[in-house]
Amino acid sequence: MEVVEILVLAHRGYSHIYPENTMLAFRKALEAGADGIETDVQVTKDGVLVLIHDDDVSRVSDGTGRIKDLTYEELLKFDFGIKKGPQFKGEKIPTLQELLNLVKDKDILLNIEIKYGSFLYEGIEEKTYRMVKENGLMDKVIFSSFNHYSCHDLKEIDRDCKTGILYSDGIYKPYKYAEELPADAIHPYRLLVSRQIVDACHRRNIKVNVWTVDDFKEAKMLMDMGVDCIMTNKPKEMMEFLGVG
Ligand code: G3P
Ligand code: CA
């Protein structure tokens, strides 16, 4: 039987040590040997795809305001490193294009989480899809979203693009739901996984990608259950503990 190693994805980059969702955190994740990167995409007032988790910049930068109300040029005036520590001063908000440039020659998996969907950003699914497609990187990317309409819309655009349904509350028989939507993977919160769910997914060729796993023993349990991928803020430490990578 083929043994497939668990993949370790750097959640928002190597965000335990470096400022989350910055090019520095993404570069450091790859240098640490992570199998891939998880990131969050949103759209600026002038239509630029940028990588940030919150819809407001104040937690992670010295600026204020919401992404949808700020232009890319306005966002460039804010510092996205300083809140993590003075040594990170000068980090800018990255664009999706900058991250795609970084990963294009690398053998990695990129998980792009589509934030909020059309509620805040009309057409974000197609815009993100097009950028990945135009860069020729569709084989490296899985799109995910808590907004399952976004996952569904992506499959309407291209049945072959890979999608994962994110959830933080239990879904009854998530493997059946994923099959029906359809989606290629489930992306459950870490405490919502069981061996039964993993096996039922795998029988249907559905991947199980779990977030956010920073506890090493919990990661080992998930690995023993057979999950395909964990997303962690500590990719280097996690790979060392699990003996993978
Ligand atoms: O994609 C996994 C995880 O990032 C989902 O939650 O809130 O960290 O984006 P959140
Ligand atoms: Ca995310």
Image (cartoon, helix red, strand yellow):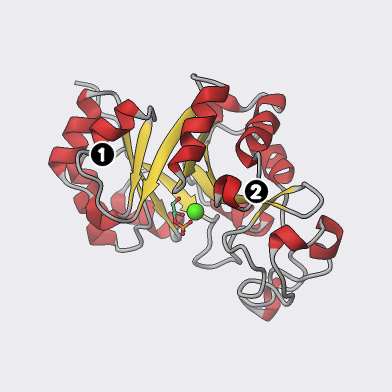
Residue ranking furthest to the left? 196
What x and y, as percent, mark residue 155?
Answer: 49, 26
How would you rate the neighbour count of disc 2 (Cα within 10 Å): few for under 14, some for 14-19, many for 20 or more? some
Q: CA distance from mark 1 to mark 2?
A: 27 Å
Q: Is residue 83 left or right of residue 2?
A: right
**Residue 245 can be seen, yes or no:** no
Q: Which mark is residue 121?
A: 2
Q: Report the mark closest to the observer, 1 or 2.
A: 2
Q: Which mark is residue 243?
A: none
State the residue in front, 67 or 31: 67
* Vertical relation: 120 (above or below) 139: below
Query: Which quadrant holds residue 198?
Result: top left
Task: Give the amino acid type for the residue marked by disc 1 in the picture.
Answer: Pro
**Residue 204 can be seen, yes or no:** yes
Query: Which quadrant holds residue 127?
Result: top right
Q: Quadrant of the N terminus?
A: top left
Q: Is residue 162 left or right of residue 65?
A: left
* Vertical relation: 87 (above or below) 1: below
Picture quadrant of ligand 1: bottom left
* SS label for mark 1: helix
Rendered residue at 44%/60% (across/down): 234
Q: Read off the residue under disc 1.
A: 174
Rendered residue at 74%/73% (across/down): 89
Query: Which quadrant holds residue 183?
Result: top left
What x and y, as percent, mark residue 148?
Answer: 43, 41
* Vertical relation: 13 (above or below) 139: below
